[in-house]
Image (cartoon, rainbow, N blue to C red):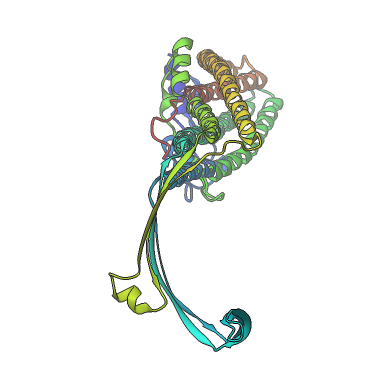
Amino acid sequence: MNALMIAALLTAAPQASQPPVAPQPPVATQPAQAPSSTSAMPGTQAAPAAGTIPITLAEARAEGRNNTQALLALLDLERAQVDVRLSRAPLLPQVSFSTIAGGALIGRQRVFTTVPDPTTGGFVQESVEVPATTRGNYDISLSLSQVLYDQARWSQLEQSGVAVEASRGQAQEQADAAELEAINRFFSLYRSQATIQVLEATVQRSQEQLERARALFQAGRVGRGEELSALVNLGNDRINLVQSRASLVGNQTQLAVWLARPGTDPLAAQDPGLLTTAPAPAPALEAALAEARQRRPLIVALQKQVRVAELAKDVATAAYFPRLVGQGSYSRGGPSPGPVFTEPRLQNTVSGSVSLQWDIFSGLATQAQVARAQASVRTAQLNLEQAQRELDATVRSAVEALTTRIEAARLSAENREAAAQSLALAEERFKAGAGSTLEVRDAQLKLTQAELTLLGNRVDVEIARFALMRAMGILSTGESK
């Protein structure tokens, strides 16, 4: 019975072709014996159907994962992937080619040179003037360099690969957070729409109660005060309905902006379907904890960050070891282009070398870098341990919150059913002349409050369930990119 009452209340959410502010009154706002709740007053309709943009929960979730913050996290992942290529580049052969074609004009020069001394038979230094001359410079060279052993380079490459996995986990975590926020904003909009429907039905009931009191007054069965009380009640209900539409517009804009849509889009949240059935029970705490520890992207990312810090320590430690590099080159050069470019048998030079570099003492800089890396490792480990503790607490709280919301929804459904019966009884008493408008009004307010409480608790169940899924890392089974 409870499930049927829930379905009756909430299936009346606006459909895709209807605006969120002009739905038909929900069936669930009608007492079982109160035909007076079948429709709302035309004067209380919110807005015409034209111009609204329907959106489903699935669409909101998918677009939420493309939120600006999620896209920024994906860009961080792309940068991390580029860093892998940059780390690999020094380990691959480095080949360069160059060619030079140039020349120099040397003007007249006065230089000292050694010349024979005819008088003594020895040599003397004399100043002579050298005429201007030109000289060409032509060269072709090809060089090859290959790292043979450099532990730091290999550790940096591995570190970059692990950093990609950490960035992927962060991107998944951010996408989950963006999706959960989209879910919350979707349900806030849906709650506003359904609240307006409940209030529209309340206005309709008050209108019919006014007509009923007026008819009884004209028949001489009740006093003028009953009619006036019903008129005031109707006015108050219309005020509540008008005021509720302000929050509807706010929720529309908040959802649209989060989904990177224009803030002016009049979105209409469609019934997600989950609200028409009784909620499934919450999972067992131990099973939820095990799932969260294994699949939560944040934990995976922090585990990778610990490994990144460990590899950073390896990079720092690699400075204690030598580096071995092989180099080779082939070049052709000369003062004129002919022999360099047209005579392969001439002007050839081939060279090669293997160099060993070893920083035996670096002023204790290596020791300092290793100590800093060790501190970074410990920091990453502490962050991981704290995140694991917080995750356990979050999952436990989420399971308990879901369990509580489910129980509250069950009690709200029973309460709503009792309130509907109470209103039907009060209306029958009023028709028979044994009751008053005050009694009917009290029953109407209790029914409205019961319907709003049921609506809020049932929506809270879904929000709590998605929050638990996000804590467990199972909100979305798709890849973040």
The answer to which of 299 and 3 lies nearer the viewer is 299
Above-or-below relation of 411 to 256: above
Q: Position of residue 128 (x, y in %)?
A: 60, 86
The answer to which of 15 and 315 lies nearer the viewer is 315
Identified at 62% across, 22% down, the residue is 445
Above-or-below relation of 285 to 470: above
Identified at 64% across, 22% down, the residue is 441
Identified at 56% across, 45% down, the residue is 257
Q: Is residue 228 left or right of residue 203?
A: right
Identified at 43% across, 31% down, the residue is 272
Above-or-below relation of 264 to 102: above
Question: Could you tell me if residue 326 is visible in this image?
Answer: yes
Q: Position of residue 365 (x, y in %)?
A: 64, 36
Q: Is residue 391 left or right of residue 54?
A: right
Above-or-below relation of 329 to 294: below
Give the residue furthest to the front: 120
Count the numbered circles shown: 0
Q: Position of residue 440 (x, y in %)?
A: 62, 20
The answer to which of 450 and 155 lies nearer the viewer is 155
Point out the image quarter for the N terminus: top left
Q: Is residue 58 left or right of residue 104?
A: left
Question: Could you tell me if residue 279 is visible in this image?
Answer: no
Give the residue furthest to the right: 225
The answer to which of 376 and 392 lies nearer the viewer is 376
